[in-house]
Amino acid sequence: MSQFPIINTTLASIEASPQVRQVLHHLHTQALSEDPFLGGGGPTDGALDKFVALDPDKCALVYLLLRSTGARFVIEAGTSFGLSTIYLALAVGQNAGLEKSSGGGKVIATENEPTKAVQARRNWKNAGSEVEEWIELREGDLRETLEEGLPEEVDFLLLDIWSPLALPTLILVHPHLRIGATVVVDNNIAAASGYKDLTAYLENPANGFKMTTAPYSGGLLIAVYIGAGKL
Ligand SMILES: C[S@@+](CC[C@H](N)C(=O)[O-])C[C@H]1O[C@@H](n2cnc3c(N)ncnc32)[C@H](O)[C@@H]1O
């Protein structure tokens, strides 16, 4: 039993081996034990050694969204120590395994901070092949690392990044989104002012998105790319 009941509820929402569960339990406990992070607008706020991880209940939702949509090509903007990435990789691996002729799948993870990248790789290794083999980590500024080599069709984009980087990332990925692709943005209520430009972009009918906000802590924006001018 965890000191954080939300971790048990979350782990009950996913399909995973005991090894993966143990790693997730450990990482969530560490993340929930750290002091609250009040930044979000940029890396000047002392977050270099912090998880600033997606809340457990949001991780469960993201995992289930991926499973329900059969997502196989996923991009994560903002990876930190790779906690949320484990959920993405689990779902991608399970979806790819269900469709034998599917042509595989992968999670493209992105992290700018070298020490965080090292720790993320260590966490994925500890989780094992169920997770590790589905992840391609691109180290460096995602405005450069996502410029090329994206999958032709992206099924899911997780924007868990400092708010000024969210719209530039979406603009890079947008041409690759398949119709029906999902875009999830963390903390869109708590950081509403930082997300003004992103929200305006998503609301512009010419860009082809429909969205709603789920009332998780800080808000979780869920947008679906329905395509511009499709109706
Ligand atoms: C909110 S954290 C991600 C948390 C992670 N998704 C999780 O749930 O475990 C955002 C991360 O984005 C990284 N980051 C900030 N600017 C970046 C950039 N320009 N390119 C790539 N990563 C960046 C930060 O170092 C930080 O680790």
Image (cartoon, helix red, strand yellow):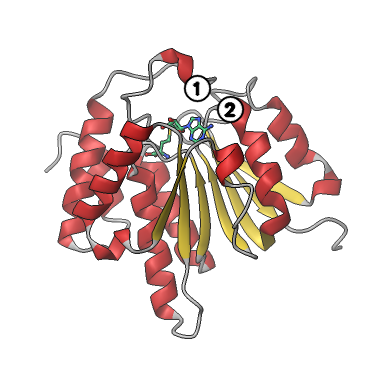
- Residue at screen point 24% across, 46% down: 122
Give the side of residue 132 with respect to residue 111, left or right.
left
Question: Which of the labelled discs sits on residue 40, or is there none?
Answer: 1
Q: CA distance from mark 1 to mark 2?
A: 6 Å
Query: How far across and down, in percent of the image, does residue 3 sit?
Result: 15, 34
| Mark 1: amino acid | Gly
Does mark 1's beta carbon lie closer than 8 Å to ligand 1?
A: yes
Helix, strand or loop status at disc 1: loop
The residue identified by callout 2 is 163
Ligand 1: quadrant of the figure = top left
Query: How far across and down, in percent of the image, does residue 106 sit?
Result: 46, 63
- Residue at screen point 20% across, 45% down: 25
125, above or below 142, in the image: below
Give the side of residue 35 with respect to residue 107, left or right.
left
Frontmost residue, 220 versus 42: 42
Query: How far across and down, in percent of the image, does residue 55 sit?
Result: 37, 37
Q: Quadrant of residue 50?
A: top left
Give the side of residue 80 with respect to residue 216, left or right.
left
Quadrant containing the N terminus in the rendered view: top left
